[in-house]
Image: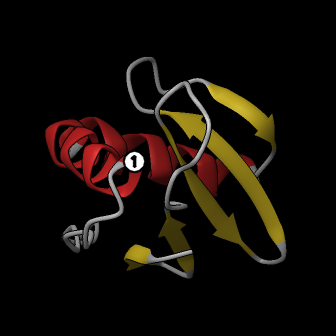
Amino acid sequence: MPEISRFFGIVIKMFFSDHAPPHFHAEYSGQEALVTIETLEVLRGRLPRRALALVLEWAAVHRDELRADWECARSGRRLTPIPPLE
């Protein structure tokens, strides 16, 4: 699963040819959450409250880039790294 961003110990990844709805995987401290791109809703899993807040803040800023990477992942093309949250 390609890593597309990393910040504050959080790793953001996407699977190639993953299932709908469009989403990304956020990992932190051994925990994982799947977050939808359109609504920023947690589909499955969980993260500590502070880590989830950082993930959602990052995703809101980079939603267009996440959509583009989702399309690339669905078609098996290389994903573009997305800048971390600063």
Outermost residue to the top: 39
Query: How far across and down, in percent of the image, does residue 33 sit?
Result: 72, 49
Q: Residue at x 41, y 79 (%)?
A: 6
Q: Residue at x 39, y 47 (%)?
A: 74
Q: Relative to 2, does residue 20 appear above or below in the rendering?
A: above
Q: Amino acid at mark 1?
A: Arg
Left or right: 25 in relation to 56 = right
Q: Quadrant of the C terminus?
A: bottom left
Outermost residue to the front: 75
Left or right: 3 in relation to 18 = left
How many callouts does the rendering have? 1
Query: How far across and down, in percent of the image, does residue 50 sit?
Result: 62, 53
Q: Secondary structure at mark 1?
A: helix
Q: Quadrant of the N terminus?
A: bottom right
Query: How far across and down, in percent of the image, does residue 13 sit?
Result: 50, 66
Q: Residue at x 45, y 78 (%)?
A: 3
